[in-house]
Image: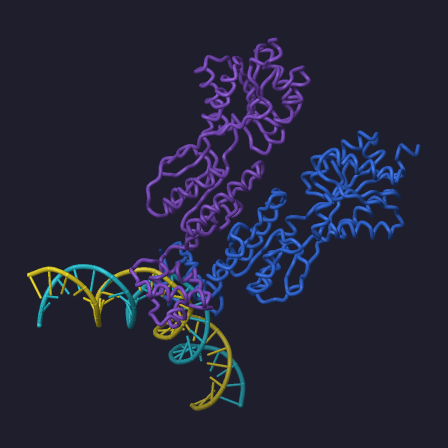
Chain colours: A blue, B purple, C cyan, D yellow
Amino acid sequence: MVTIADVARHAGVAPSTVSYVLTGKRSISPQTRTKVRESIRLLGYHPHAGARALATSRANVVALVLPLRPGVHLPVLMRFVTAAVTTARRHDMDVLLVTADQGAQGLRRVAGSAQVDGFLVMDVELDDDRVPLLRQMGQPSVLIGRPAAVKGLTCVDLDFEAAGARCVDHLADLGHRYIGFLGAPSVVYQRNTGYAQRTMAGFGAAAMRRGIASTALPAEDDYESVLASVRSLLRTQPAMTALVVHNEAALGWVAGSLRALGRRVPDDMAVVAICPDELAEQMQLTSVQLPAEELGRQAMELLVARLNGHPTAPLTLLPPKLSGRASTAPRLRHRGTA
Amino acid sequence: MVTIADVARHAGVAPSTVSYVLTGKRSISPQTRTKVRESIRLLGYHPHAGARALATSRANVVALVLPLRPGVHLPVLMRFVTAAVTTARRHDMDVLLVTADQGAQGLRRVAGSAQVDGFLVMDVELDDDRVPLLRQMGQPSVLIGRPAAVKGLTCVDLDFEAAGARCVDHLADLGHRYIGFLGAPSVVYQRNTGYAQRTMAGFGAAAMRRGIASTALPAEDDYESVLASVRSLLRTQPAMTALVVHNEAALGWVAGSLRALGRRVPDDMAVVAICPDELAEQMQLTSVQLPAEELGRQAMELLVARLNGHPTAPLTLLPPKLSGRASTAPRLRHRGTA
DNA sequence: TCCGAGTGTTGAAGCGTTTCGACAACATTA
DNA sequence: TAATGTTGTCGAAACGCTTCAACACTCGGA
C-alpha cells in the first residue's frame, strides 16, 4: 500500500504538507501543490480510510437503514436508495447498508464502532421502535417517514395532506362536484398509520374548502370487497363522478368494479390514484406519486447538513406532484350529462 | 468515546490483555476474561473500526456493487441483497453499497482507500466492463452472473442449462411429447447474452435426450408478436401440448394468445415459465425460478472464504428449482385425448 | 535444587492520518 | 532599521487498536 509518507518522499516534502494539499486546510504554494498532486497521481495514492477516520474521528460514511419489511414497494425503495447514494457521493461520503433484521443491535454497533457518522433511516412508521434509540444515541440522523413526535428529530416525508388535497383540487378544477375516496384497508387506519389518516384528512378538508360533497370508505384488497365498497359509495352518492383511490393493492380491482357497475373511466367516473408512478403509468391513471428520488436526495442533503453542524428543521414535507393521465377528463365533456 | 484503555483501567489489566480477550488470539485466564468482559459491558465499549482497520489492515467490510440498470427485476435483486447482507453479518462483516453510476472509479476508490476487503458484484454480464478491472485490482471478489471467461475469477450463477432441461423433464414426466419454447426477444440472442442461450441449449439437449420433439422461437414483448409466435409454434407442431416460456415480459401475453387460439391451460396446453417466483405465483404458473436468496448467500460465503485465503472454484452453478402450479397437468388427463 | 517448558500478562512499537505549534523566509509598516 | 505580520513548510504528537518480544510465574522432572 502506498502511504502519505511515500508521496511526501517522492515529492520531496513533509507528510504534513501532503496532507494539507489534500485537505486544503492550509495555504500551500502553487509549485508545491502541483508537485505533490503529480506524485499522488503517479503513485496512485489513496488515503487510508481507517487511518483518516482515526485521526479525524469522522468516517465519511453514513448508514442507510432499510426495513425490508413485507409490503414495501421495492421499485420505489430502490429509487430512494439510488438517489440517497448518489447524493452522498456528491459530498464524498459512502453508504453502509444496515438491514432491519440487524435491528437496534445493528444501529448500536455501527455507531459505537465509529463506522458511520450518521443514519438515514427509511420507511419510518408512526410508532417506530428505532426512533427512541436514535434519539438516545445522539448521532445525527434523518428519517424518511413521519413518526408520532418529530421534536428533536429531522424527518422528511411527502406531504400526504397536500396529496389528498391535490387530488380534490385537480378534480374540482375539472368540474367534478361529487367525489368519493377509496382508502386503505380498515386495519391500516386502526393501526394509526399516519400517512393514511393524513391523506384522508387533506382530502376531506380540501373538499369542504371547495364546497364539494365527499364520501370516504376503506377498501380491502380482494375483488369482492372493492366491488362492495365502490357500490356502497355509488349508492350513498349517486351523483358521484370522480374517485380518489389511496390503495395500491385495490387499484387493480377498482377498474373491474366500475366496469361491473356500468361506469366507464373517465367518462362516467374520473379516477385519481395515490400510488407509485410505475403502477399509475401502467394502468394509465392520473396519479399523485411518492417523489422517491427527491425524498432520497433531500434526506441525504439534510443528513450532510446535520453532520456539518448545521441546524435542520424537524420536519420537511415535500409537495405532491400530480401527473395527468387518461383516467381523468373535464366534467363538461361527461357524456352522462349530454 | 470509550477506548480499550478505559476498559483496561477499569478492569485493572493492560490494554493488550483486553485486546486478547476480544480477539481470542492468546490464552487468558477465566478470571481475567470475565473481569474484562464485565468492564466491556459496563462501559459499553465498542472497538473503533478505523483503528482496528488500521492495525490489522482489514476493514471487515465488503462492497456490494449494484448495477441498477433498467430492466433488472428489483424484488429479485432485493432478495439477493438481503441474503448477502445477512450472510455477511454472520461473519462479522458489514456491507458498503456501491452503485454502478460510480463505475470503475468507485471500485478503485473504495479498494484503494482500504475501505473494503473485497467485492460482491451483482448482475454481471457476458462482456462486463467491470471484470477486467476486478481482475487487475487483485482484491478478492465474487461475481453473481457469468462473464465470458471465468478463469481466475469466482462466479456464482443459476445453472441455466439445467433450468432449461428441468422444464423438459418435468413436462416429459407428465407425458408430454411435443414441446415448444418461447424465448426472449431476438435481440437478446443476437447480443450473445449468455443465460438466454444456455437455457435454450439446455432445453434442446434435454428434449433430444428424452426423445421429445421441440420447436423454439423468440418472442418480442407485445401482444401481436407473442400471438404470432405462439400461432407459428402451433402450426409447425400441431401436436404440441406444452410450452416453456423464458420471457418475463411476454408472459402476460402468452395466456391471452393461447386463449385466443382456443387452447385452455393446462388442459390443452401445459405452460412452464422461467421467471421470478412472484410473477409465477401471481399468474399461477408452474415455474423455474432464480434462487435469489441462495445465490446471495453462496456468493457471500465464497467471498468470505476468499478473504480468509481459501481457494474457490471459478464457477459455482446452483441447481434450478421447479415449483409446480396450476399451469401444468399430466398429459393423461388431457381432455383433448378423451 | 535447578532447569526447561508451559501459562498468563505486559510494555512498546507500529498502522497511516491529521493537526498543532514552531519556525524560517519574506513582506509590510513604523 | 527594527518590529511586526504573513506565508509556506516541517516535526512530532495524537488517534485507538493489534501484536511481538519479553517477562514473571507455576509446575514437573531430573
x%, y% of residue B196? 50, 27
x%, y% of residue A3? 37, 60
Q: Residue at x 73, y 48 (%)?
A: A321
Q: Name, please, the residue furthest toward the top.
A: B338
Q: Name, please, the residue furthest toward the right.
A: A338
Q: Residue at x 49, y 20 (%)?
A: B168
Q: Nearer the viewer, residue A34 or D10?
A: D10
Q: Residue at x 66, y 57 (%)?
A: A147
Residue B49 in the image: above or below residue A70:
below
Kindly tell me whether residue B317 is visible in this rendering. yes
x%, y% of residue B131? 43, 40
Q: Nearer the viewer, residue A319 or A230?
A: A230
Kindly tell me whether residue A287 is visible in this rendering. no
Q: Residue at x 50, y 46 (%)?
A: B103
Q: Is residue A299 left or right of residue B188?
A: right
Q: Nearer the viewer, residue A310 or B186?
A: A310
x%, y% of residue B179? 54, 16
Q: Quadrant of residue A217?
A: top right
**Which quarter of the rendered picture does the C terminus of chain B lie within?**
top right
Q: Quadrant of residue A286?
A: top right
Residue A160 in the image: above or below residue B331:
below
The number of discs equals 0
Q: Is residue D15 left or right of residue A222?
A: left
